[in-house]
């Protein structure tokens, strides 16, 4: 619950923080663009003023108002961004307009006077931002006052004032804003989509954690239950054996047969408990491997010996030619379990025929094959063979008891020792299980 709360807070912070960062970035960029554009505009206006003043110097000095008016009018018509231009000269009443374009004021306003005077006295260009009109339309402009200085006397002759409209720069800034707004929207959509995905993944992760917990509990239960079952079962088995063998006077055949069945079922139960115990050990990583040199014939000969009698009862022969020169690097006990299981299955799932064990050494591995002429299986059954609890269900197997755990367990053993187990089989012809294990060098 605490974790979920934290996740929600985290999501909300992201949803708010990222768009805020994008907005801040947009504002910063547009401000920088506006400032760069404005200073460029002022610089341009000033140099236009300076060039204009120089080229009109004679007319300004002579106060040729008519010709100046004509030129200034032509200039504002030619250049769209130029709202108005005027030239002011000092009179006894202060600065007065001597020539102007149509939209320029005839008389300077107080603030216009102030700016122009400043440029006049300081002999420096002075700019201010103001609302202006051009052709009857209102706009915003930089009004730049540039002094015209006499090169000989170094005195100011006049002030040229231009109003340069900022329409172009506003357009650029607006474009930047709109693009940023669009990017902001896209960002928010992406963030929301990512968060939704994140939430879903979080849900899966929690589910997985819960499943792991349940698996662990089941595994622990299996481990304890099977362990606890083992002791009473050995006691039951011991007592039944004692009754069969030591009862005086000896039991009649009927009673012996019935107790024999009880003993066989106890053995079966014992096998099941042992399989479950092994599964829980594999799952909990509690299987220990004492890796050493294992001479295969030393493991295989006793197994073959154990199963020869049982196999003979079903008219099955077991063929194996021991080669004491071939050894693997593995755990002897696990190797024994692997081949006991494979030979046991070969006998169990054959009605008659033969079982052949062959051992072949390669460069770095040894391949041991257990081949039988038993019932075999289809490719679909074969593909599921090493799954836990999988048993082939056919007419032929329905009376054969088992857990479907043996192959799963021994595959885990083989893999843990750096080996593999594979199977090849044809229905009705038999099966071949191939085990590979790392070869011992000597
Ligand atoms: P169990 O024999 O206890 O059922 P295993 O894991 O050893 O469990 O085997 C799984 C299944 O694979 C068996 O139920 C059987 O259907 C099939 N199987 C195993 N070995 C053979 C074999 N040699 N021939 C045919 N089927 C086999």
Image: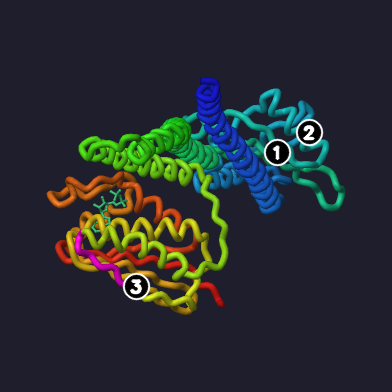
* Disc 3 target residue: 320
For label 1, the residue is: 145
Q: Is residue 33 in sight in this rendering?
A: yes
Vertical arrangement, residue 16 with respect to residue 38, above or below: above
Tell how many labels.
3
Q: Which residue is drawn at the image coordinates 41% and 43% (left, top)?
A: 274
Say left or right for 207 vs 252. Answer: right
Q: Which mark is residue 118?
A: 2
Q: Is residue 199 visible?
A: no
Q: Earlier in the sequence, mark 1 or mark 2?
A: 2
Q: Are the residues tagged 1 and 2 within 8 Å (C-beta)?
A: yes
Give the crowd class for mark 1: few <14, some 14-19, many >=20 residues within 10 Å: many
Which mark lies nearer to you, 1 or 3?
A: 3
Indicate the quadrant where residue 129 lies: top right
In reply to whether residue 316 is colored magenta, the answer given is: yes
- CB atoms at circles 1 and 3 under 8 Å apart? no
Residue extent of the magenta highlight: 314-320
Please give the label number shown on residue 341.
Answer: none
Which image quadrant: the C terminus?
Answer: bottom right
| Residue 209 rendering spot, x and y as whole percentages | 47, 33
Distance from the alpha carbon under mark 2 to that under mark 3: 117 Å
Q: Secondary structure at mark 2?
A: helix
Secondary structure character of the magenta stretch overall: strand
Q: Secondary structure at mark 1?
A: strand
At 55% from the left edge and 76% from the top edge, which residue is drawn?
A: 441
């Amino acid at each position: 619950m605490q974790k979920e709360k934290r996740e929600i807070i985290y999501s909300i912070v992201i949803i708010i923080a990222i768009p805020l960062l994008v907005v801040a970035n947009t504002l910063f960029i547009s401000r920088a663009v506006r400032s760069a554009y404005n200073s460029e505009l002022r610089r341009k206006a000033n140099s236009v003023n300076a060039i204009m003043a120089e080229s009109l110097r004679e007319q300004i000095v002579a106060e040729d108002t008519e010709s100046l008016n004509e030129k200034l009018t032509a200039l504002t018509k030619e250049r769209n961004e130029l709202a108005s231009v005027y030239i002011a000269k000092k009179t006894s009443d202060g600065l007065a307009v001597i020539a102007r374009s149509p939209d320029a004021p005839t008389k300077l306003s107080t603030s216009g006077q102030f700016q122009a005077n400043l440029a006049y006295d300081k002999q420096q260009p002075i700019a201010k931002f103001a609302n202006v009109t051009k052709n009857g339309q209102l706009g915003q402009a930089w009004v730049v006052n540039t002094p015209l200085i006499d090169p000989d006397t170094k005195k100011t002759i006049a002030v040229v004032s231009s109003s340069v409209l900022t329409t172009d720069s506003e357009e650029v800034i607006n474009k930047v804003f709109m693009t940023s707004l669009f990017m902001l929207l896209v960002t928010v959509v992406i963030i929301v989509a990512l968060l939704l995905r994140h939430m879903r993944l979080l849900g899966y992760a929690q589910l997985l954690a819960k499943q792991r917990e349940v698996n662990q509990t089941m595994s622990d239960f299996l481990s304890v239950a099977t362990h606890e079952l083992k002791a009473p079962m050995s006691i039951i088995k011991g007592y039944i054996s004692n009754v069969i063998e030591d009862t005086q006077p000896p039991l009649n055949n009927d009673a012996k047969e019935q107790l024999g069945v009880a003993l066989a079922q106890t053995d079966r139960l014992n096998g099941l408990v042992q399989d479950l115990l092994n599964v829980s050990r594999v799952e909990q990583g509690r299987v220990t491997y004492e890796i050493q040199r294992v001479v295969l014939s030393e493991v295989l000969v006793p197994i073959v010996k154990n199963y020869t009698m049982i196999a003979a009862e079903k008219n099955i022969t077991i063929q194996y030619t021991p080669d004491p020169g071939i050894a693997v690097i593995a755990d002897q006990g696990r190797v024994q379990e692997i081949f006991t299981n494979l030979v046991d299955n070969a006998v169990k799932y054959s009605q008659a025929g033969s079982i052949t064990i062959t051992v072949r050494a390669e460069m770095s591995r040894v391949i041991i094959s257990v081949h039988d002429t038993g019932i075999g299986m289809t490719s679909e059954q074969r593909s599921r063979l090493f799954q836990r609890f999988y048993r082939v269900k056919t007419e032929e197997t329905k009376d054969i008891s088992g857990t479907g755990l043996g192959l799963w367990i021994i595959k885990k053993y083989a893999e843990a020792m750096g080996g593999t187990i594979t199977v090849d089989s044809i229905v009705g012809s038999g099966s071949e299980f191939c085990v590979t294990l790392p070869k011992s060098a000597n």
